Image (spheres, rainbow, N blue to C red):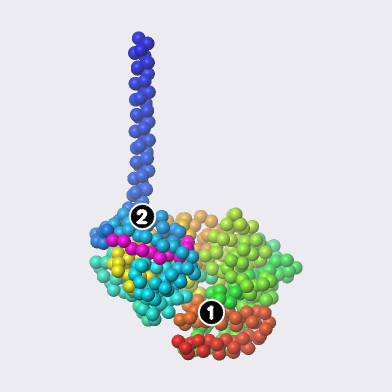
Amino acid sequence: MKTFKVFFNLLLLLLIMTVITACSNTNNNELENNTEEESESRNHNEDGFDWEQFSGQTITLLANKHPWTEQIEPYIEEFEDLTGIEVIVQQYPEDQIRQKALVSLQGQSGDFDVFMSLKSREGLKYYNSGFYETLDEYVEDENLTSPDFDIDDFYEGPLEGEKFEDDLVGLPINVEGPVLYYNKKIFEQYDVDVPETMDDIKTAAKAVQEGSNGEIDGVTLRGEAGALPFTFGNFIYNNGKEWLDDGKSNFQDPDRIEAIQLYADLANKYGPKGVVQFSFYQSSALFAQGKVGMEIESSNELSTIIDEKNSNVVDDVGVIPFPTGLEEDSKLTQLQWGISMNKFSENKDPAWLFMQWATSKDMQKELAMNGIGSPRDSTWESEEYQQSLDSEVEQEWADALQFTLDHGNPEIGPPAEDQDKVRKIVGEMVDKVILGEMSAEQAAEEADKKMSEVLEQE
């Protein structure tokens, strides 16, 4: 009898464990199925496009160490499952990727198929050298391009930034532009109005500096020569001008002189000490410490200045579009990274499938919800994306970035092949005024001579 009771208890215990395991497996299967359904919903195409037509092939992506790369990499397995194409990712810091790409392209090597490229930097040089595969025929080929891709969904600014002489040489993967960050607590403390025009920035900076008896700087912005054109260009555009007049340098134009002087005044009267050495890193660090009232900088810097680990102003940040100037239809510097196809690739068709997948509506919405500014209109219209902006500063940031998309100009510096040289000329021109070494008129005259020499050589 005792033996039977032990046997019965063991049998009952085994039965209970079997039921628990079955329930657990059911729950796990449901979770896995839900995850798989989410993945399939991003990749499923009801129009029957053949994503598997190049199954078994391998492509290589040459990528910069960049937030876009970090965010898309976990999804690449989905592309591989969808297409049967293996993707090898080679990732390097920006300077190294530019050097590696140039060496390979000059040698007409196909050791990578798709690569990240900053068209506002090396784009014209690469285009003139024949390094980019033009993409227009791929877009128009119904056998190679899913009907869901919708090239017209891209905002005009980012898409035009991927073109040279109307040739499409890349697809935009992100977008960023200048915004004005301001410290709401400081503005309230010193009764400062949020700027609505470029001149208002100067007024606000003065009020902060005087109100704090010089303990808080009014504004921080870029001063390092090579980095300065990104923020300074907005002063040119918002004074109703472009970088050049009919292909010629003319910084001595009165409106451009005014832009130079305003930028220099903000820096040397209301900016931090050593501002001529500042790039985005120094400016954002200072703003995050609460030591400056405003920062003119890229929209990409939001995550830095609201990082709870390093910022003292997490709950005090306000964001607005860079204020307008003389023209009602003011333009703003707009920068986009793109992915391009290596002209010498031996895997162009599968490379194109990856490019359109990586920049598809669904994928760019997914990346946008992880902090990547999307160049697609459908992302910004998405209720799901809008609901992901769960704080006031994130919503302000999104509104400011969308304003940039609607008013963007993709030229970060004067259009020329040698961007390093022309940007340095612009930066040194403004820096000499900031430092009091020259008047705006004198610096503009010197810059025009240097710029003309570079443009004539090209």
| Image coordinates for residue 433, horizontal then vertical, percent | 65, 82
Q: Is residue 104 left or right of residue 53?
A: right
Q: Tag 1, which secondary structure? A: helix
Which residue carries the number 2 mark?
A: 77
Rendered image quadrant of residue 258:
bottom right
Which residue carries the number 1 mark?
A: 423
Give me the residue at 48% from left, 90% from top.
Answer: 456
| Residue 321 can be seen in this image | no
In this view, the residue farthest toward the top is 1
Q: Which residues make up the magenta segment?
A: 57-67
Q: Tag 2, which secondary structure? A: helix
Rendered image quadrant of residue 284:
bottom right
As drawn, 228 above or below 287: below
| Image coordinates for residue 286, horizontal then vertical, percent | 64, 64
In this view, the residue farthest toward the front is 107
| Image coordinates for residue 161, horizontal then vertical, percent | 42, 75
How many residues crowd mark 2 within 10 Å: few (<14), some (14–19), many (20+)? some
Badge 2 amino acid: Glu
